[in-house]
Image: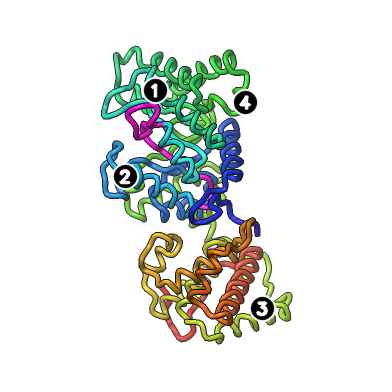
Amino acid sequence: MGKPWCVMDSRDGVDKVRQAEAAKSFLSRHCALPVILLPNVWDAMSARIFAAAGFDYLATTSAGVAWALGYPDGEIAPWEEVVAATARIVRAAGVPVTADIEGGYGQSPEAVRNHVAEIIRAGVVGINLEDSHQGSIRSVEDATARLQAAREAARKENVPIVINARCDIFHQQHGEESGRFDATVARCQAYLAAGADCVYPFGLRDPDSIAAFVQDHHRAGQYHRPAWHAGRNGIRAHGSRADHDRFGARAGDNGRYRKACGRPAFDRKLRAVEQPFPSSRCTKAFSIERIAIMKARLDPRRIAPGAMQALLGLQTHVNACGLEHGLLELVKYRASQLNGCAWCMDMHTKDARAAGETEQRLYLLSAWHECSFYTERERAALAWTEVVTRLPDGGVSEAVFATARTQFSEQELVELTMAIIAINGWNRINVAFRTVPGTYRVPGHAIDK
């Protein structure tokens, strides 16, 4: 199994080379069908949920991020907190993330330039910039200057982020209704000329109007920009996935309602997005119906019992090595999250609960960096688990090793490493051969929740 996509080369830095490559890929994806679905995320956990559902790219929602931080929407949240929250989302997602930064959180193009540079350093591959502020529409000159500043920041950071220019003429009901369509077309063409890669006529919902907008956009793009098919001049729009494919829009934003809806409603909406569009790569996500008919590819325990017994022998040693049972369960669960092993996640959450682990610590394990619910010894073990599982290009850093040594003796660290090797082995077997999750029962427990 390949290493998960991640731009973070440490807790303090971003791999700019990988980030730039991901940004280029994101841009090229805008000029291909099927339409990209960009589910909106607001924190590390929501990013994990959508990434696990199979979406290739995620987009932050400015409203959701603000609400999660305890502020209303509209550039009220402190910029530093927004950047920090975005960095957490990028680190947790495992797939590329584009960020909605509203109008750039700045009174001037220079402030926008600085803020775009900071959000790039958080690891994003794209941004959303809108042309309205507090209910009014900025002048074309101001809006284009902000886009030019954003592009300049991207060049200086050596990351060609995808800049999506949002035009709010329809959303704000700006000007006479009869003139809004032409004004939106004119603004969007100006935004592309200023350095935007794609445009978002927010509030343009009527399918016929979207189709007309796309046609005008194509004509302008082909005349002014022969590189249309290279990914400039992409369009993002509301509406159904089928309409987007039919009319030529290149990306769909699922909106920001998720933060306000409960998990059951959230899951129903997610399935509604996935199921009508079998051509979408997001159908890697298994619906409830697909899970019910999912079958294992083969049974390695029956086919190669000697090999499986050897791995079981390693696991038996690990279980008796003297490391705390609760710590080992966290390690097994975290590695299984990283590897996407449903069987092992099901097994080790059940084992952990049976051993007295709390729901809160299990729910937040994927965001353990940001939580205070784990001991220093557990945090060192989790950091060691992540680097040994992922094996980043730079190897295991001295900092991570030094932290581990402050919490574990030499023998304990070797035993911990063997535990990580064992769970990675089980993960790869179960993922490769599609062991169907859900049937594991904790020994001695009649009911597993």
- Identify residue for label 1: 143
> Which mark is nearer the camera, 4 or 1?
1
The mark nearer the N terminus, 2 or 1, is 2
Above or below, 311 relative to 155: below
Residue beneath label 3, please?
Answer: 311
Q: Quadrant of residue 300?
A: bottom right
Mark 4: which secondary structure? Answer: helix
> Callout 4 environment at 10 Å: few (<14), some (14 to 19), or many (20+)?
some
Of callouts 4 and 1, the N-terminal one: 1
Residue at image location 49% in from the left, 32% down from the top? 153
Q: Position of residue 445 (x, y in %)?
A: 44, 83
- Mark nearer the N terminus (2 vs 4): 2
Of callouts 3 and 2, the N-terminal one:
2
Dot 2: few (<14), some (14–19), or many (≥20) neighbours within 10 Å? many
Q: Amino acid at mark 1?
A: Ala
Q: Residue at x 50, y 31 (%)?
A: 244
Q: Secondary structure at mark 2?
A: helix
Q: CA distance from mark 4 to mark 3?
A: 51 Å
Q: Identify the magenta region.
A: 94-112
- Is any atom of residue 238 visible in this view? no
- State the separation of the CA atoms marked 3 and 2: 47 Å
